[in-house]
Image (cartoon, rainbow, N blue to C red):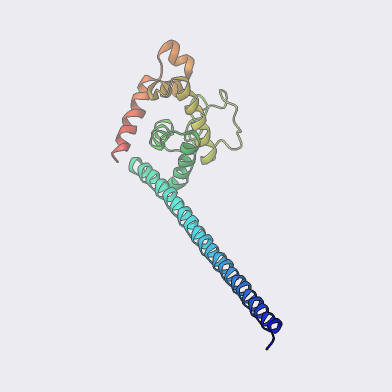
Amino acid sequence: MGKPFVILIILFLTMFIISGIKVHKKTVNNLNKQISIKDSTIINQKNNILEKDIKIKEYEKVFDEIESINNKILYIKKFSNSSKLAKAIYFSSKEHNIDSDLLISIAFNESSFKKYAISNKECIGYFQINPNAHDVNLDLIYDEYYNAYYGGIILRKYLDQYNNNKFSALCAYNAGPTGFNKNGWGKKYAYKVIKLYKKLDNA
């Protein structure tokens, strides 16, 4: 066997081995990609499950809070449709960053939880919104959500005005800022609301 032939065989074997190594690397890379895709899929599925769990827990938390508000309303006074008022108070409290117990106390002291209550000053609904003093939609004023939402708007304005002092804000809610600032009106009302508010904290 001649020397050139031996060299040719060695070159052939070398190329064969290199080709095998490349095929092996390609196979390994493909497997790694498949594993990576599979891992990614599993991770995504896990994240989706976790997100669903979080959402379920968030929904459960909302339902629990609304149920707690409803129980406190019924603790004060039993009446039909309390759950709808509870939902309205919940959303108003979240929207305006106001303790739901305080909104419950206001609604009871303002209207005794009477949806269609109208005062001698023409204040309307659960939160006794005065359409002459506030720019409200009269077609929606009796709706629980609208009435509670607008009650939250008014109270939040006074809380901000009086540096989050609940007593002063409640006086202004009842008597208006002018009546409270000039004449000190609304104090009796504020005491009643805060008394019930503290009572609800232990209910």
Q: Is residue 13 left or right of residue 80?
A: right
User: Residue 10 in the image: x percent, y percent?
Assistant: 65, 79
For this orientation, the residue located farthest to the bottom is 1
User: Residue 79 in the image: x percent, y percent?
Assistant: 40, 45
**Closer to the camera, 117 or 137?**
137
**Closer to the camera, 118 or 54?**
54
Q: Residue at x 44, y 13 (%)?
A: 181
Residue 126 against residue 56 in the figure, above or below = above
User: Residue 174 in the image: x percent, y percent?
Assistant: 44, 23
Q: Residue at x 68, y 82 (%)?
A: 3
Q: How many marks?
A: 0
For this orientation, the residue located farthest to the front is 2
Pick the quarter of the image with the C terminus. Answer: top left
**Closer to the camera, 75 or 181?**
181
User: Residue 136 in the image: x percent, y percent?
Assistant: 59, 30
Residue 135 against residue 13 in the figure, above or below = above
Pick the quarter of the image with the N terminus. Answer: bottom right
**Closer to the camera, 168 or 130?**
168
Q: Is residue 81 left or right of residue 26?
A: left
Residue 33 against residue 112 in the figure, above or below = below
For this orientation, the residue located farthest to the top is 182
